[in-house]
Amino acid sequence: IDDSVQNKNITLDDIFISVKTTKHYQYTRLPIILKTWFQLAKKQIWFFTDIENRQHQNQTNGHMVNTNCSASHQRKHLCCKMSVEYDHFLESGKKWFCHFDDDNYVNIPRLVVALQKYNHQEDWYLGRTSVNEPVQIYKKPTNELMFSFWFATGGAGFCISRSLALKMLPVASGGRFISICEKIRLPDDVSMGFIIEHLMKKNLTLVNEFHSHLEQMKLLPPESFREQISFSYAKAKDEWNVVDVPGFDTRYDPSRFLSLHCFLFPQFKFCPR
Ligand code: UDP
Ligand code: MN
């Protein structure tokens, strides 16, 4: 595959963008997304949550999917959401499945351009690893290495081509993804890596423009913001791990996502001019 050949046929409408969210974040994280990058892909973004909220349903034109998965951070329930996200993608008929967390900022135009480099009719698993070594599975009790695999960290976002998603259908569709999570006892994003790398024998392709809060966000230079696909934020004790971007007061915009959005898209109504 020649990466320099751009598949200009891919447009925003070929991408199914799923955002995992939950009851606990409906009035904190979700409103930031709705105000910013959701506005750039209202028809393509779907939220996967665990609660009914009439106001959000109206604001998104019915794009809030109540997964009926429990509102908890337990592996089983997070895998439940990923499973529903994947099934909805299959149903959508779109060419690309891109998953993000609700503490991501997605640079929508850049996501589209990035996917134009790859052919959705080939098998692609694009993302960023969270650790510098693959997951290693050992046999008990001899501690013999059985196999290892890489996975794309869900907190940075990842994309899967339709071709690959269809190959996973026998093992992952219709809720079977949850069974795999339970069998291997690993989180949803790790289970995705297990299915793709170990079962499908397709390798993760590293795309460094995806970012999670496992990295230090302030190390991203503003000159590069336009080239990045995703950003994140986190608060540990009193310390915020956020993008260093000029803009609104930190009390008004602690995540810095409103400021980041105005940095990238200054024409938005809420941006200062
Ligand atoms: N999340 C969820 N249910 C929960 C807790 C979290 O669906 O009970 C989602 C949350 O909305 C986010 C992702 O899981 O999209 C990661 O959550 P968080 O950022 O709180 O934790 P992290 O894994 O990044 O430490
Ligand atoms: Mn997070």
Image (cartoon, rainbow, N blue to C red):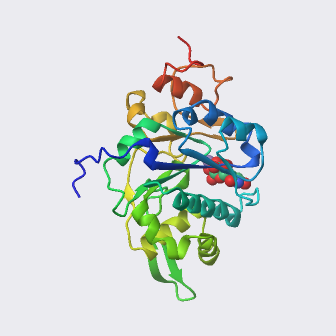
Q: Compared with residue 21, is residue 273 higher up or lower down, i.e. above or below?
A: above
Nearer to me, 166 or 31: 166
Rendered location of residue 172, percent (x, y): 55, 71
Asked whether residue 84 is in view, the answer is: yes
Tell me the residue at 73%/41% (across/down). 26
The residue furthest top is 273
Q: Residue at x 44, y 42 (%)?
A: 12
Which residue is more in the foreground, 5 or 90?
A: 90
Q: Name the quarter where the N terminus is drawn.
A: bottom left
Q: How many marks?
A: 0
Identify the image quadrant of residue 79.
Answer: bottom right
Horizontal and vertical percent position of residue 168 = 48, 71
Residue plotted at (65% across, 74% down):
182
100 or 254: nearer the eye? 100
Q: Can residue 134 be seen from the camera position used here?
A: no
In percent of the image, x 52 and y 38: which residue is there?
A: 41
- Using the rendered view, name the quadrant where residue 225 is placed: top left
Q: Is residue 144 left or right of residue 86?
A: left
**Residue 35 point in image, percent of width and height:** 62, 30
Residue 36: % across, % down: 58, 31
The correct choice, above or below, for 265 with respect to 149 in the image is: above
